[in-house]
Image (cartoon, rainbow, N blue to C red):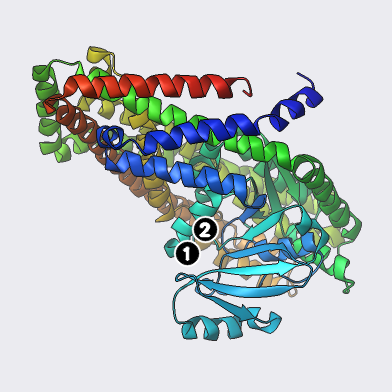
Amino acid sequence: MSENTTSLNYAAAEPDIEYVQNELKQLLNNKPLCTILGDEFTEHLHDWDKAITKRRTEPFSLVVLGDFKRGKSTIINAILGKSIAPVNVAPETFTINSISYNEIPKAEAVLKNGQRITLTADDLVREKLEKLMRAFPDTLDYIDIHDNAEILKEIRIVDTPGLSDLDCLDKQVQDYLVNADAVIYIASALSPFSESEQLFLASHIRPLSFSKLYVLVNMIDAMNTQEDIEKIINRVSERCESIMPNAFVYGVSGIDEYRRKIGLNRPDIKGFQEFYENEFLKFEMSLKREIILQKDIIRTQRVLTMLNLMIKDTAARIRMIYEMMAMDRKKLDDISLSIERECSTLANALESKKPKILLSITEMQQEAEQWMYGFFSKLREDILESRNTTSPEDIDKHFYSFLVDKVGEAYRKCLDIHQQQLNLIIAQLGAELAKKLGINALADDANVSVEGSMNDFNMLVSKSVMNAASAGSSDAFPSGAMSSFKNILRKKRQTDVIDTALENYDDIRNQTVKDLKAAYKVMENNAIAQLDSLYQTQVEVSRDALNHAMEMSNDTSSASVKKCLEETAVVLRNAAQILGKYA
């Protein structure tokens, strides 16, 4: 299909979208149907409807995400070409900032009670903002910033808090994310793509099916060589490829671009100034081509995706209830008793799986130690050889960073390879636990579609795994070994750097291996926590599905319930057929 044909189809989609959403609204106003679906699921559908309405009526929204101290606000100011988003704020001060167009710039604090308080540009400075927030009559919801920057005529930009630092704002950030049209995720070249960042993309971004995602690796000006920059970008690109294949990855310096646009001095000690400028220009050209010029199509695609997901969720729930009602009551009772028996022996069931996890991680740790000893043996040879093959000037300039990079890369490689292996083991154990609880048997015995329940299950599991990982993920660098590296740096001016490295060589190796052991202990704790969460979540999903089915089977008006479900299924099939032509 050509681009023109696609654009024409999407341009004509609005009447169909309006019709389908109205049909779904009528289902939500059907009280008997809502009773059958259950309060929790009905609330879930109301949330879908609100999100779709917001998506259709609010400005095109580009949400900027990332962990704290990744330079999100600086990147936004570089895009806008002026200082608008607050920078250098502490975690407890960081706010959600909605930045949109207005001919006359202004800013307002929007409180939870709906009250709006006018702010000046000076108020957005950290110290002033902290005092104001303490004096507000209610909790701050977000800061509504308006400016006449040209790009804001096309899109609204939402600046969000650091994802790993402000748990109290997670729900707010999630709401903005659900209502986003496109996303820019900011990573840092100084700590590229941690495990928790990858989990966030996998569990929160990927399920929302964004057609375009930008991953900006900020602070590449901190890198010393072109080779270092390429290594970081390739690392992030490889990780993105396995999680979000449609992501655009760029290495940028937000601070350099911001300084360039507002005419400030741009220090260029490393001689990369032109490179930074070109990379940011490539990003901006792609942003204009892929997002701004396509924003109407993207908006329609997002609404269609959300409607289809709402239809799919509802159809799966109806099918599950309908088919469970057709089951023999005794079978339902048997399955329920089976699940309760499993719940009563939960601790034993978990304990039976943990030795496999512990053994696997012990073997991984031993393998990593062998790798590391082999690596250090080869590294010593490379260090000795460099004395004969490298000029003293280059050794003085680059040897220390070379040594740190090599050790850090080897350390991360061990953990990365084994974390992937461990994820597969946990997934397999999770499947075994699901089978043990009877989820698979339930579907097989009654030909029940548990798609809707499993969607909820997957969301819960993603969240529990996220929490487990953020509780103590492995460091990106062997922290204990840093004291040995500091010894080298301290003596660098007084002694030959290679001699100093060799003097501290055994200590670096031993500290790195010690750090590895600690990292694998963290990995072990996280794996057990993930396994606990998987089992608990599967128990909840199984129990909820069966309880709801048993309630329906007890209903004296089961014939009218089935009729209601059948009529709803017809409405949903018709809605899906209408939207199908835009697939």
Q: Is residue 60 above or below residue 90?
A: above
407 or 461, nearer to the observer: 461
The residue that mark 2 highlights is 163
Q: Amino acid at mark 1?
A: Leu
| Residue 165 higher or lower than 184, as above or below | below
> At numbered mark 2, what does the secondary structure look like: helix, strand or loop?
loop
Residue holding disc 1: 166
Q: Are marks 2 and 1 in contact (CB under 8 Å)?
A: yes
User: At which x and y percent is residue 271?
Assistant: 90, 61
Measured from the top left, where is residue 358 in percent x and y?
A: 31, 39
Q: Quadrant of the N terminus?
A: top right
* Residue 260 falls left or right of residue 35: right
Q: Is residue 216 left or right of residue 56?
A: right
In-image side of 177 versus 152 (left or right): left
> Residue at (18%, 34%) from the top-left corner?
349
* Badge 1 element: loop
Q: Residue at x 45, y 55 (%)?
A: 514
| Residue 158, image quadrant | bottom right
